[in-house]
Amino acid sequence: MSAPIDPVLAGRAGGALAITPASMAKELAQARAKLARGMKRLAEISEDDLAIATVPRDEVYREDMVTLHRCKPRAAKLHKFPIIITYALVGRFQMIDLEADRSLVRKLVASGFDVYFIDWGLPGRAQRFLTIDDYVSGYLDRCVDVARKLSRAPKVNLLGVCQGGVFSTCYAALFPEKVKNLALAVTPVDFHGDKKEPQTGAGYMNQWTRALSAQDIDDMVEAYGSAPGAMIGFAFLMMNPISNLTKYTIDLLDVLDDDAKLLSFLRMERWIADRPDHPGEVLRQWFKDLYQDNKLIRNELVLGGRKVNMRKIAMPVLNIYATGDTIIPVSCSKGVGAHFGTKDYTEVAVPGGHIGTFVGGKAQKILAPTLAEWFGKRS
Amino acid sequence: MNSFDPAQGARSVYSFWLSLIPQFMSQFGGTTGAKPQAPLTMPWTIPLPFPADEIAKAAQMTQQALQTMAQALAPMMGAAAPKIFTQWAAALPTSAAPTMESIGQAWSDFGGRMGLPTNAELNTAFDRTYGALADALGLGPARQLQAAWRDLLEAAAAQQEARASYALVVNAAFTAGYERLVKQLADKASAGERIDSVLALLKLWALCTEEAVHETLQSERGLAATAALTRASLSHHKAVQRVANNLADMLGLATRRDLDEAFREIQALKRELHNARRRGRPR
């Protein structure tokens, strides 16, 4: 501690403390007892208790490490156009079906939709040279074709999440004839939006990437090839280092004492730990073309020799952003409707953070019903 | 169902956060008495599924820390009010700063946690291989290796400097966080509010410090320090690779570049194949 504490301020601060040695001893003894009970409960937890993404489904397509899953329908009559959910590469798809009662996928299936989702799998060293175009015009396009064929539909509804939302946007611009409706969730569209509305604690990735040069990004890809998943996970955790220390210490007290909270916490931790490696060339484009040069919203992004022109997205667009998103700041998602070519653009705010959008109690009540209604009216 | 088998990297992330628990808790007087990453004796014998096993470790370390915290904090809480903060502040330079230094160091060292050798390991490896290669292959190739090794040492020194600069920035954030806590408590006192829970006090400290960390790391100085550390870490990583490439070349083994070229070619061929198929079918 370099700066001395102002004695007058310290004196005033001390006046706020009503902790006595006796009250503290009692409180900490209770805390230790809670932890002891929690550890006993942890010892009873089985592998089945921690299973995530268990929605009944069939694998309908596989290519390299990518698989397309089709959920088993629950309604007798399905909407005409199927939904394909595209998640990001930086995490696994399980977030959309983390727990049975907090599952976006299950809610859409229950609403009568024919739901597919893509698992991008675990790219290895051999996938280092995959580009965004390989994902968009390659894997995603082939998944769309499989879904169109199986569902006997000329077009599909696309629901893209975060980075998957950017892929879906690119796809809708390049293959508009195959997309009935485009829905985006917590998706960055204006990667420089945070410059207009700087926010402490949000948009660190935007600022950090811009603090690097294009050469730094090239060096990063050269040095790592595919970025190790654990390194990416670590980078996310470092955005809130103190919260991540309290998460594994004093915050555990609340979690361990509540069985439902404990299981949800462990399932979430399991999801967080499952970080795939990120193909180096995708990372290069993601950081340089998008975070540094903001080419998507400027219609300057080029994939496979073709320019991604957002004005070509004339189908209806639903854009859902999270009001407390610190990874994709609101200013990067909100107010981008004018850049799409559609006349049917809707923006919806959900409470909570980037991941809370899919698992948070309040957001759960908004996200799936909004999507079901919006797609339903247009499918 | 199949059990979940986390990648080694995921384990290393837990290992990192858990290794900080003793330092984090010790600044409030709590210490686990265990060295970072030291194995703990668990009250059960059956292996727990991931990540229940890691959380159990964290819970046990926290439990141990709380045991000693009560004793350490009691004299402070019993003291006259202003004394609490001067005592706490006096404890911070030797406790909080290393916590964040550890975070900063781990940030720059994270590559090492995923399989890269440490400088000490490289030193030993070099001493052994250099002599052997010089004998076996002659001095020419060995000189190349020596040059690569010299580059690596320079990169390691530059990385240390970048780490030190980064540590200064994060330590300033800790100072700012503590000052913010004292200010908030003073404001609470003025408003007639009281905190009667030590855990609530710790949570308030965490909140104040997190805000200060965000502000600091998002400042121009913070971003510059982070970028410099990233650059230094990348240079170090590449210098390690050059040493490994030299060794591989000398021994006639495939290098990373050789494999990358093969992967690049395979990817290009796949792309061509898909394009040819697409051209051959109606949309």
Image (cartoon, coloured by chain):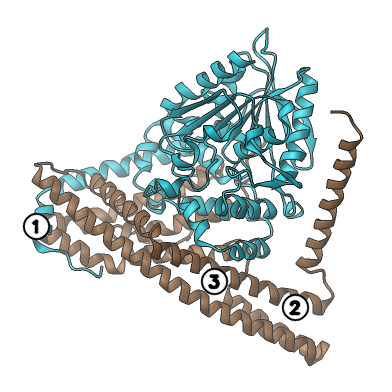
Chain colours: A cyan, B brown
Circle nearer the viewer, 3 or 2 = 3
Residue B121 in picture, x, y percent from top left: 61, 76
Front-most of B38 and B16?
A: B16
Q: Is residue A356 above or below residue B69?
A: above
Give the left or right position of residue B20, taking residue A23 as reference: right
Residue at numbered disc 1: A11
Q: Is residue B151 above or below residue A317?
A: below
Q: Is residue B43 visible?
A: no
Tell me the quarter of the picture where residue A281 sits: bottom right
Helix, strand or loop at mark 1? helix
Residue A16 in picture, x, y percent from top left: 12, 48
Give the left or right position of residue A49, taking residue A254 as reference: right
Front-most of B105 and A27?
A: B105
Neighbourhood count class around disc 1 (C-alpha, 10 Å): few under 14, some 14–19, many 20 upward: many
Callouts 3 and 2 close, C-beta under 8 Å? no
Q: How many marks?
A: 3
Residue A257 in picture, x, y percent from top left: 37, 34
Helix, strand or loop at mark 3? helix
| Label 2 – label 1 distance at C-alpha | 63 Å
Residue at numbered disc 2: B246
Q: Is residue A317 above or below residue A87?
A: above
| Label 1 – label 3 distance at C-alpha | 44 Å
The chain holding disc 3 is B
Kind of residue sitting beneath label 3: Ala
Q: The C terminus of chain A is located in which quarter?
A: top right
Helix, strand or loop at mark 2? helix
Residue at 48% x, 76% y: name it.
B160
| Label 3 – label 2 distance at C-alpha | 21 Å
Q: Is residue B19 visible?
A: yes
Q: The N terminus of chain A is located in which quarter?
A: bottom left
Residue at 27% x, 52% y: name it.
B205
Residue at numbered disc 3: B232
